[in-house]
Image (cartoon, rainbow, N blue to C red):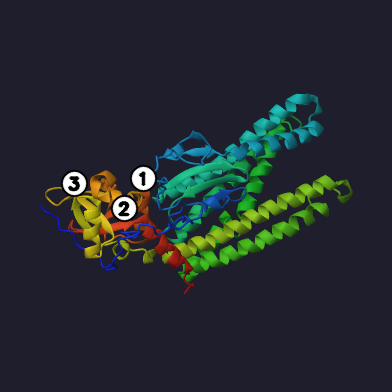
Amino acid sequence: MRKTLRPATDSTRIPSTPSPLALHDQSITPRYRPTTHPHNAPHTTGGTAPPDSTERRTAVPDTDETGERAPKRSDPGGGLLMGRPFGVPVYVSPSWFLVAALITWVFGNQLDRVLPELGPARYLVSLFFAVAFYASVLVHELAHTVAALRFSLPVRRIRLQFFGGVSEIEKEAETPTREFVLASVGPLLSLLLAGAFYLGMEAVDAPTVPGVLLAGLMISNLLVAAFNLLPGLPLDGGRMLRALIWGVTGKPMAGTVAAAWVGRGLAVTVLIGLPLVTQTGLLGNRSQEIGGMDTVMDALLAAILAAIIWTGAGNSLRMARLREHLPELQARALTRRAIPVENATPLSEALRRANEAGARALVVVDGHGDPTAIVRETAIASVPEHRRPWIAVSTLSQDLTHGMKVSAELAGEELLDHLRATPATEYLVIEPDGGIYGVLSTTDVEKAFVKAMARPQS
């Protein structure tokens, strides 16, 4: 059956030069993550993820400089792939090797005082400790991952990095109870691991390699659990606080705001309190034994932790605002008016028809009027005006795939999920009955998103 092209509500006419289809609109530089489509900020262990993460990935597809769909990469920036437990890829970032070397050096020096007979072999034992510690962090993250999968929440990947690990969960929990469970299972697993290491430590002699390793792993897992239970975003404890406030008020945004500001308070506390605690000897060292280098290292560590917590809390607030504005992104409202043209139509003639109809997009149709491709706006812009009568629109078009067809009823997160699943620069928007509505450009989606985010909060 022949499908008729139904114009969208955009009635804006376009000039014939220099941009016949308004194709020179500058794309918005910032990429957004709704996990960058709007998703929950990632769960973290032993610290928080740097804000990439807010780590949800952009809903707007990446394209190359010609506007073509960029080649699909396995997982850009993920690091070294270690495996896929439960079908979720686990990556080790390059920064992990730096912290592993640091742990090996520090723990090795401590072993020299406890087990001096080991000699240089103490660094091999220390390296084993570093690997075992991050294996514990991985178990913590897998707890978050399994809970997320149990709640039908997609998990993009797990990354082990400088300050712990991050599970990139790509959707929000639907209820405060699920959010609480999702946040609490990681620290709970760390506490269980600490208990298991304690039982193992009781079964061996203390001044031995197994005894020292088990004691170190017990203490490190207790610290991971305690740190993550601090009640401020982006830590697990902050997500638990958010869930509690959400459950009481019925407003997830209220929980996010409260937990994020508590997180910022924690960042200030860490920045000021950690150096003070070490300087006063509350961690076991007498103040006169603390040298200048120790003071510098403590201050540096406090600054890094505080910066990560503060940034993560801010990202959580931005992600909450993003989710609030998502319903404003509607495929029907953002769709450009389009006209049908056949394969052999010269570009100049197609643009003339588009200008007469007040359209801003071209859809290539076959002899039966069925759509087969979309003419790419960047390709049109690259053709000099004097050559347009000799160029057929078919040479500038992108063949339609199933994923490039978008329902006019899609909006918010569902729309962004669809765009992310099938990266392209333009999409054919269709009515529920199969009729063609127009063309959706990712540039227009980005501009609408930035405009919505700039609007003052209600």
SS of the residue under disc 3: loop
Query: Taking the image as drawn, is residue 230 in sight?
Result: no
Quickly name the residue at label 3. 344
* Residue furthest right as drawn: 288
SS of the residue under disc 2: helix
Give the percent coordinates (x, y) of residue 268. Answer: 69, 61
Q: Earlier in the sequence, mark 2 or mark 1?
A: 1
Determine crowd level at label 3: few under 14, some 14-19, many 20+ residues with C-alpha closer than 10 A. few
Amino acid under label 2?
Glu
Residue nearer the viewer, 213 or 110: 110
Q: Earlier in the sequence, mark 3 or mark 1?
A: 1
Query: Taking the image as drawn, is residue 23 in sight?
Result: yes
Amino acid under label 3?
Ala
Quickly name the residue at label 1. 68
Residue found 44% across the figure and 40% down from its top: 88
Residue found 62% across the figure and 59% down from its top: 310
In the image, is 260 to the left or to the right of 422? right
Q: CA distance from mark 3 to mark 2?
A: 18 Å
